Amino acid sequence: MKVLITGADGQLGTDLCKVLKNHQLLPLTINDGDITDYFFLEKQFLSYRPDVIINTAAYVRVDDCEDEVDLAFNVNALGARNVAVAAEKIGARLVHISTDYIFGGEDNPRSVPYTEFDDPIPSNTYGKSKLAGETLVRHLCKRHFIVRSSALFGTAGAMGKGGNFIETILRLAKERPELQVVNDQVFSPTCTRDLADKLVKIMPTELFGIFHITNSGACSWYEFAVEILRLAGIKTPVIPIKSEQYPQKARRPRYSVLDNYQARLLGWDDMRPWQSALVDYMQEKAYLNR
Ligand SMILES: NC(=O)c1ccc[n+]([C@@H]2O[C@H](COP(=O)([O-])OP(=O)(O)OC[C@H]3O[C@@H](n4cnc5c(N)ncnc54)[C@H](OP(=O)(O)O)[C@@H]3O)[C@@H](O)[C@H]2O)c1
């Protein structure tokens, strides 16, 4: 299949390029052009004529989205609209990547995983802008897959965030005598390599609609940090704290675990546990020291 990837040098985009190496591939980065520029996309799509477009490009800095509301909606909503319209124009399939942060904005946090059939209630601008992008994709491109995932980690590190949680924790654990990490936000950490493998499985099918794809299991940021340091053999103490003790501009969901419900109904194997994906990450980065 001929595949075009936006955000190709990002954390997920980099792994997608690796797993798609046997396909014809056009990797686009922001240096090639901006997804907020419809005419750039239309020109690329018309000249390359991909069968599938995978839109990973997004403005992902969750706290900055609160100050840069226009930019968040421009990229995450209108950029997604542009990709959807141009994809529809050439009759391509569109795999659009979204997030668990479209959930979790309820006053009373829940403790049961969200399925693809639950109504989204975002809690911050990033989540609202990504949800608006989903809505536009659903209406404007017939053959769409909206794939929601969560707390991504990949060896390339998130371009937009300047790394990822694993790298940040390892750095801080070397700089500080102890770490304080939030213990009341629960989600499913997901390895971009595993997600990329699943996207490649989904994209040639006719199973259009919404998919939740995450590694299995769930944890808080505190539990994630403890496991990272355990695998790295670093003894810096980690203290669990509440969200209120770590004020951030954007309100975060207390619980945003995604039930991979559609995949389960289809009889697909569960994704492996996040702990096992983390071991591979640590091994690949030569951080493993247990
Ligand atoms: N990271 C997470 O924890 C997480 C969790 C759930 C879902 N997601 C979703 O997963 C997708 C991939 O995330 P990621 O972690 O791989 O992020 P990433 O590493 O920051 O990759 C996003 C890419 O999009 C590019 N980009 C940003 N604005 C653009 C624009 N206007 N036009 C074209 N390209 C643009 C970025 O380039 P620059 O960095 O050079 O601007 C970057 O290469 C996103 O849709 C995100 O919403 C992420």
Image: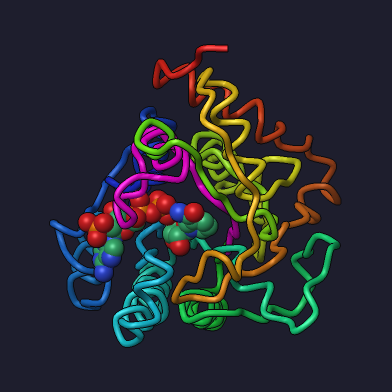
81 falls in the magenta region: no
Question: Of residues 160 and 200, which is closer to you in this image?
Answer: 160
Q: Which residues are magenta?
A: 146-171
In this image, 188 relative to 135: left or right? right
Q: Is residue 196 left or right of residue 21?
A: right
Q: In this rendered view, identify the residue nearer to me: 48 or 269.
A: 269
**Percent x, y for residue 81?**
40, 79
Along the line of sight, the residue nearer the viewer: 41 or 180: 180
Residue 45 at least partly seen: no
- Quick check: 162 above or below 119? above
Q: Position of residue 212 (x, y in %)?
A: 68, 56
Q: Is residue 77 visible?
A: yes
Q: Position of residue 45 (x, y in %)?
A: 27, 63
Q: Residue furthest bottom?
A: 70
Residue occupying image coordinates x 72% and y 57%: 258
Query: Ligand 1 is found in which quarter of the picture?
Result: bottom left
Q: For the point 33% across and 83% down, which residue is it? A: 67
Q: Nearer the viewer, residue 198 or 150?
A: 150
Which quadrant holds residue 215?
top right
Question: Residue visible at 66% across and 66% down?
Answer: 209
Residue at far front of view:
177
Q: Residue furthest top?
A: 290
Is 147 on the left or on the right of 126, as rendered?
right
x 21%, y 68%: residue: 34
Residue 123 image point, x, y percent: 60, 79
Quarter of the image for the N terminus: give it: top left
State which quarter of the image contains the C terminus: top right
Q: Residue furthest left?
A: 31
Q: Quadrant of residue 40?
A: bottom left
- Against 54, residue 43 (above or below) is below
* Left or right position of 215 against 56: right
